[in-house]
Image (cartoon, helix red, strand yellow):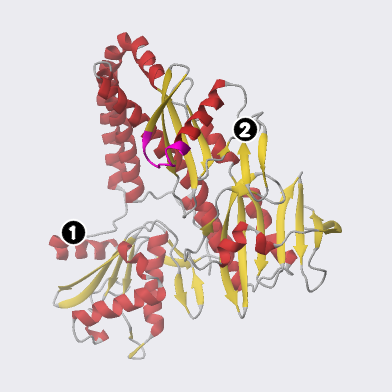
Amino acid sequence: MTSDVSNTNIASPSSVRRRLTRDISLLVLLLIAFFVFLSYLYSTQIQKDITVALIDSVQKLSIEKNNRLFEPITTNLLLSRKWAQLESLTTAKQDSFNKRFIPILETRPQISSVILASSDGKEYFFTKTDGHWLSRYINPDEHSADTAVWSQWSDNNQLIKQWEETTSYQSKDRPWYQLGISKSNDKPVKWTQPYSFYAKKIPGITGVTSWKDKDITYLLAFDVTLSEMASSLANIRVGKNDTSYLMSSAGEIILPPNNNHEVKGSATGGSLYAPGRDADNYIIFDSVNHWLKQKNPLDQIHKFSRNGKVWWYKVFNLKKDNHSIYAGVIVAEKELLDVISENFKFMLIGILILIVLAIVMANILVKKYAHQLKDVPKTSIIHSDFSNEIYHLLRMGESETLEFKSTMRKNLKSGKNGKEIEIAWLKGLVGFMNTHGGILLIGVDDDANILGIEVDEFDNEDKILLHFKNLLSQHIGLEFSQYIHLLINQIEGKTILVIECERARRPAFLYYKNSESFYIRSGPASVELSISKVIKYIQNRYD
């Protein structure tokens, strides 16, 4: 049974807390910013500190933008690998491949192309160019090793035309292939350094994941363009002439598209945008040249002079999924002082107005969120008031965040331990983590009667804890133990288990009988989603 309930309107405690923290933090940051600006006028050291703070804020924003870009792409790549394994996908299954990846490429424009390659020299490349879907198929068993079969497809996956070309291209020579088969990095998704894509000749990076089927290694790769990231960085400004930029670890600068600068580089050597005549982009190259002379330091603020002006800059690694994309930010020292001086007479008035507004907004926020927090589902109990908390839960009855199970492993009808009993409540834990969290009571039947788990016949609490840990490791994964908290206690002379489950920050799956299942909570039940609905749910939840 599957159900799509991704558009639920129930707020989780963590989401309410995040919004409350966000709003109050913004309020506090605005107040702090004005007081820091005022102090900036009286001390040279504070002047430097302000510059550092601004650079760090741009760095944080840059990393956040990078995370928002790559997290859903990484998730899609991992889900696609799982689908490919389940479908036994090969380069010859072009129809299935196209149907799978046309929606992904349409909804994720940052993904330039998708590649499936194998260690026996076969490859299927799929992309969209000039409004048409285009594929390149290389199969030494069907054609010569230097023959590429190109196909053009319609939006409904109908073949329009096909032709052959002689090519020197080989998958094994590409950076993503060499990285994918390398054993030096055991991450599920590996990211290349920035380089120029072979077919489109544009700068980007490639994420690759691999698996083995018999004696053949398969690699699934997403080519991700850096144009959106470069544009986002170029739009981050802390002053009139200040700027941010994207670059490789070798100092090759990736400017946004349509920047009217000469492009130098090659498919194997990467792309380098040469500077134009405007002062802004010369500043970028001045900072990079200075950085290279300093032997490529990261996360350090340096300064250089140009035409009598002092500029501060910092280069940092965006540090997501082990790829090495660097970013830099440059701040003009004098410009910051000029802006502060020009607006000094308005600052005191602004501070007073801001304080008044902050008081008003704080009252509004308290009233707003206090009402919401009353309606937040209960996902944990007060341990010091165990009995009252349990009785309160029993009165509430089963819901989206509360479930009762009679036993941990014993089938009460047969009187024997049953795997199906364990899987039933493990589904609930997975559903809680994928929705809003919740509480599972074991030793309580569906009618809220306290039965206790004595019927499970565990020798002691240590045996219970060990059995619980083994089930968690086998069917969910110990990496999710940080979201699951087990409490063993007695009430009415009977032992019950209270499992508090937090909302997980990444998708959780149930592993059973060589398959993976994705569950969410819908009312008092845990329901399984199909693969297509899993993708949609994860995109809506984690984007």
Q: Nearer the viewer, residue 48 or 159?
A: 48
Q: Residue at x 29, y 58 (%)?
A: 379
Q: Which mark is residue 371?
A: none
Residue 297 on the magenta span: yes
The amino acid type, in three-letter code, at marker 1 is Ile
Q: Nearer the viewer, residue 175 or 461?
A: 175
Q: Marks 2 and 1: in contact by CB < 8 Å?
A: no
Quadrant in the picture for residue 149: bottom right
Q: Residue at x 30, y 15 (%)?
A: 350
The amino acid type, in three-letter code, at marker 2 is Ala
| Residue wearing tag 1 | 382
Q: Residues within 10 Å of mark 1 (few under 14, many from 20)?
A: few
Specify start and end residues of the magenta stretch as a single range: 292-301
**Percent of width and height locating residue 77:** 56, 59
**Percent of width and height locating residue 451:** 24, 78
**Percent of width and height locating residue 145:** 78, 67
Q: Does residue 355 appear to the left or right of 112 in the view shown? A: left
- Regarding residue 128, the answer to whether it shows in the image is yes
Would you place residue 401 above or below residue 311 in this image? below
Disc 1 or 2, which lies upstream in sequence? 2
Q: Does residue 370 appear to the left or right of 248 in the view shown? A: left
Q: Secondary structure at mark 1?
A: loop
Q: Residue at x 24, y 16 (%)?
A: 42
Which numbered disc, 1 or 2, marks the residue closer to the eye? 2
Q: Nearer the viewer, residue 189 or 82?
A: 189
Q: Does residue 492 appear to the left or right of 340 in the view shown? A: left
| Residue wearing tag 2 | 274
